[in-house]
Image: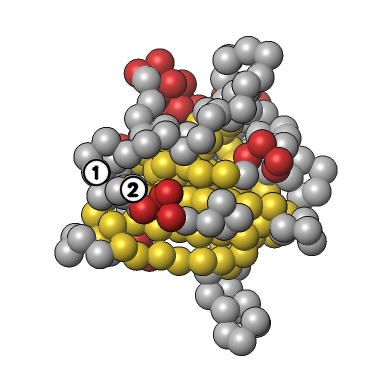
Amino acid sequence: MALLNRLPVARLPWLAAIALALAANQPPALGNPVSAPNGTARRELTPSASARPAGAQPVVVPVPSVELNRYVGGWYEIAKIPNRFQRQCARHTIALYNLRPDGRLSVLNQCIKRNGNVDQATGLAKVVDPVSSARLKVSLVSFLGWRPFWGDYWVIGLDDDYRWAVVGSPDRRYGWVLSRTPRLDDASMASIRELLERQGYAWSRFEHSHP
């Protein structure tokens, strides 16, 4: 029985965090993707190569806008830049986000560890750019309600139908490819790789996650 079915819908994923759960080889889809007028990929406002000095790395630029009421829900981790806080995760990494009355997002990241146990991390995300809602800060550490550590969570790629999303940070230290379903088609993955390279990311740094 999939663990996702036992998670409260009102909880959410991680920032560099992401949660997961299941014990089957074929995890169920995380709800019905929200439909949109078309399925074309959203264009990012990445500076063109001609606008940068020769040899200069492009600036990481978030998408023009994110509708948080469509972004919330469940996401599967498709790929990521390896990081220390996910070292224990072996497979089935998911993130669950939910919009709170105060405008912040609750976050639940979950995965299955190598020993088969479920690992969870709960946190909070806040919007730091209310114009676009594409730049957020996420905290997964709380001391009696005090959150001293916040990390950048920038949505730098987003499908028009909110089928997939790419999350990064301005220093390119972190990066995730998220999807509403356990797998993405080749065309979507090609679009994601292209946008990451336009943002100055090396695709070779990303490792594919086990669904």
Q: Is residue 93 left or right of residue 173?
A: left
Q: Is residue 36 above or below residue 129?
A: above
At mark 2, the secondary structure is loop
Q: Residue at x 30, y 48 (%)?
A: 1
Tell me, yes or no, if residue 207 can be seen here: no
In the rendered structure, which disc, 1 or 2, sits on the residue that comes first in sequence?
2
Residue 24 is tagged as 1
Q: Position of residue 68 (x, y in %)?
A: 70, 42
Q: Residue at x 35, y 18 (%)?
A: 186
Q: Badge 2: how crowded within 10 Å, few (<14), some, or many (20+)? A: few
| Quarter of the view holding residue 159 | top right
Please give the residue where the numbered disc 2 appears in the rendered image: 2
Q: Which residue is drawn at 37% across and 36% down?
A: 28
Q: Are marks 1 and 2 in contact (CB under 8 Å)?
A: yes
Give the residue furthest to the bottom.
Answer: 144
Q: Where is residue 88 in the image (x, y as percent from the top left)?
A: 27, 64
Instruction: Look at label 1 and name its amino acid.
Output: Ala
Give the residue furthest to the right.
Answer: 131
Pick the front one: 70 or 143: 70
Q: Where is residue 116 in the image (x, y as percent from the top left)?
A: 20, 60
